[in-house]
Amino acid sequence: MLSRHDLKLVTGMNIREYFHDAIFSAMTHQHIESNDETIIYIVNLLTNFSRSENIYDETPDGMMIRPLALIYGEAQDAPTNEKRNKTLQKLGDIALFISGLFASSLNRSLVGIDYFIAMGGNAYGSLSYTMRNAFNGEAISNVYAELSDRFLVFVDILSEVSDKTEFSDNSDIMRLYETWLQTGSQYAGRRLQQLGIQTVPVNNRQH
């Protein structure tokens, strides 16, 4: 889902390398450390979703991203554990992708970013528990565990990746403020302070 402007930026550079560099830069700026396997997972997620057919589904109303509740219901009704796991992975991946890169779009939806964070974190948590008992599943279980436990941290990282321009109007500032209020995002709080808006500490949901 890269824009044409983004595609110009990565001309001559592999998209995977572009995302790796962008994530590494954001993590360095925010003084965040993570397991290499988790970083690779997120880079692959972004690379995969850079192709719209990998995130959109065909519906009677056209190509759309299905509501998370429907994806969750599909996972619960899955005929096999493999299908359930793949569906939960898609739920977690979409929740992270949207809440990190397209949080402003949630202002026009019936649910807020806190809903996406809760759904995504729970999906990854369920996957971590399931894969922990699977054959050779310890490594990916640890990745899902970190994604679940630090979901908001990774939302902050992706928010900085998408935040390439200065805020130009009040609606952008309000979107940032609502994100900070709903989630306690440290990145959103710092950005507000950079804009001259003082914030009162809130109870961060993740550390």
Image (cartoon, grey):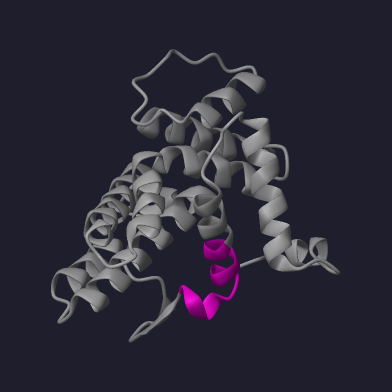
Is residue 204 placed above or below 78 in the rendered structure? Answer: above
Residue at 67% in and 32% down: 29
Of the 4 image quadrants, the one containing the C terminus is: top left
Of the 4 image quadrants, the one containing the N terminus is: bottom right
Residue 47 locus on image (x, y percent): 60, 67
- Does residue 32 appear left or right of residue 129 in this picture? right
- Looking at this view, name the residue that lies furthest to the right: 12
Residue at 71% in and 66% down: 15
Residue 87 locus on image (x, y percent): 29, 71
* Viewer-closest of 2 and 27: 27
Q: Main secondary structure of the magenta part?
A: helix
Which corner quadrant of the image does residue 206 belong to?
A: top left
For residue 2, say whether it is visible: yes
Residue at 30% in and 47% down: 115
Q: Is residue 164 magenta?
A: no
Is residue 15 placed above or below 103 in the rendered structure? Answer: below
* Viewer-closest of 154 and 192: 154
For residue 108, say whether it is visible: no
Residue 186 locus on image (x, y percent): 50, 27
Residue at 73% in and 43% down: 165
- Does residue 61 appear left or right of residue 81 in this picture? right
Which range of residues does the magenta coloring cover? 44-55
Q: Is residue 47 magenta?
A: yes
Which corner quadrant of the image does residue 195 belong to?
A: top right
* Viewer-closest of 86 and 11: 86
Q: How many marks?
A: 0
Residue 18 locus on image (x, y percent): 73, 59
